Amino acid sequence: MENQIEFSDSPVQGGGQWSQESHVQGNVPPSEGSLGGGQNPGHGPAMHLFVYLIYFISLSFLTSGIGAILFQMINKFTIEPSLANIIGDNFSQFAIKYGIASVIVAAPLFFFVGHYLNKYLKEGEIDRDSKIRKFLTYLVLFIAAVIVIGDLITLIFNFLDGDLVVRFTLKALVVLIIAASVFGYYFWDIRREDFVASDHLRKMIARAVAGVTFLVFVASFFVVDSPMEARNMKIDNNTVSNLNSIQNSVENYYRQNAVLPKNLEELQSTNLYTPYLREDGSNITYEKTSDSAYRLCGEFKRSNLVDGDNSSYYGKEWKHGEGKQCFTKNVSSIKTDSVNDKLNIKTPPSQMQPQTGFDPAVMMEESRARANRAALKSVMSSAMPMVIICQDDGGTVVSGSGGEDMCSGASGELEMAYEWPTLSQCSSVKWFVKNGDNENWDYTMECSGLPDCNGPLNAICNQSGCKFSGTCS
């Protein structure tokens, strides 16, 4: 027949023949895109490995993101007042933001790649017994098992260490439900034989997972701060850091001179550390109100009166409302290091009775040494807020010299504040940081002119505060 013209002399792979009839039925010569077994030449083992790696990496971020959101929601709504101020026990904006970001990126990628993987399996382009498929599936399940075991150990430890029963129970359920879902689905998937017959069940499971993911994602926005709120909080934290540093500088000035400075310019003209004052509306003002009291004022973007005491490193000391807020400080309880106080000079020297055992020159040197140590302690303490803000911005705190950048990779807008402080008493200042990329950070300082406080044995700061001992005490 005319529609079945055969080209019997045309050689084909495997000794067979190709006809116009076979073309009408949808077959093509091997040379035009088909390799033995019907595989697409673009879908080889390397392509399968790439797709499965993307699939399982997106799965890991998706599950960790959902877990982080649920954990922080549990922390948010199961707070015991007696534990409300314990570091690490409260709701973390950083953790829930990580969870939201992970779900936004990983969820679409996971479902998209999963759809095409199942399509390839149904069409036979990926073999059911593919070694790549089985190896990566079991490898991911093994890693997941290790993570689940670690999470459960941590939860049980926290429970034995005093965590709430309801909080422990809810978090354990989250871990077990996520683990059961992952293990149950992939053990079923690796054993199924008829991908076409089981596709309906797979789609139902995918829809259920997508629904739960969407619900968790939407719920997270009821507890997370908006980007504007987060930015305002960072700006206010920087303002509080400057206020605290100025307070330390004023107190050191008072210790050294037995009087309060008249204004900030007088304080800045000394060798005492004073922070850089921003010029974007959050300038800090200082006013001497009496011989032993002064007032510090700053501009704030938001109120932190309803925030927990643990929301700031400084706790209750700098609680503030929105707008311009002032804080009255008193130095009457601070002991001064002036020579006259040490010598108890209350009358003119001409009328003072001779005293033995006191050398004014020695006393002056001791007073200067104490003032220098106090200034050094103030500088070390003042760096702590910037370390915390740097990590909140997603950066890593790095070692460096005074005046050099202390934060690498921060995404916030306060990079201008990320500099290691300097101290005029030191010809050079070097800062040494450990674990600058996580909450177990600590740092020490080496001052070439004041060796009393050099090294971790004498002075070290971490998340719990600064500790001064040995010759620096």
Image (tube, rainbow, N blue to C red):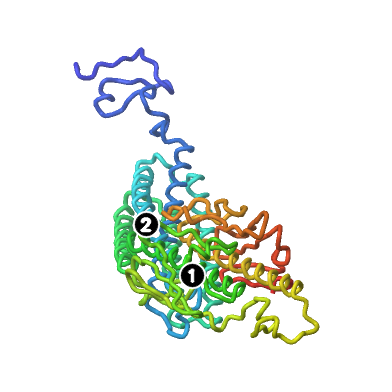
Residue 125 in view (yes/no): yes
Which residue lies under the disc numbered 2?
280
Q: Which part of the image, by quadrant, shows the N terminus? A: top left
Q: Residue at x 48, y 44 (%)?
A: 130
The residue that appears at 42% across and 42% down in the rendered structure is 126
**Who's the residue at 60% across and 62% down the image?**
271
Which of 200/260 is in front? Answer: 260
Residue 334 x/y as whole percent: 58, 80
What secondary structure is marked by label 2? loop
In terms of secondary structure, where does tag 1 sit?
Answer: loop
Q: Please report whichever mark, 2 or 1, sits nearer to the chain's N-terminal start.
A: 1
Query: Where, by quadrant of the figure, is residue 5 drawn?
Result: top left
Residue 63 drawn above or below residue 347: above
Which amino acid type is marked by label 2?
A: Asp
* Image quadrant in which the C terminus is located: bottom right
Q: Point out which mark residue 262 bears.
A: 1
Query: How far is disc 2 from disc 1 in space, using C-alphas?
Result: 24 Å
User: In front of the other: label 2 or label 1?
Assistant: 1
Which residue is at a point 45% across and 62% down the rendered structure image?
183
Q: Are marks 2 and 1 in contact (CB under 8 Å)?
A: no
Farthest right residue?
Answer: 357
Residue type, mark 1 in image: Lys
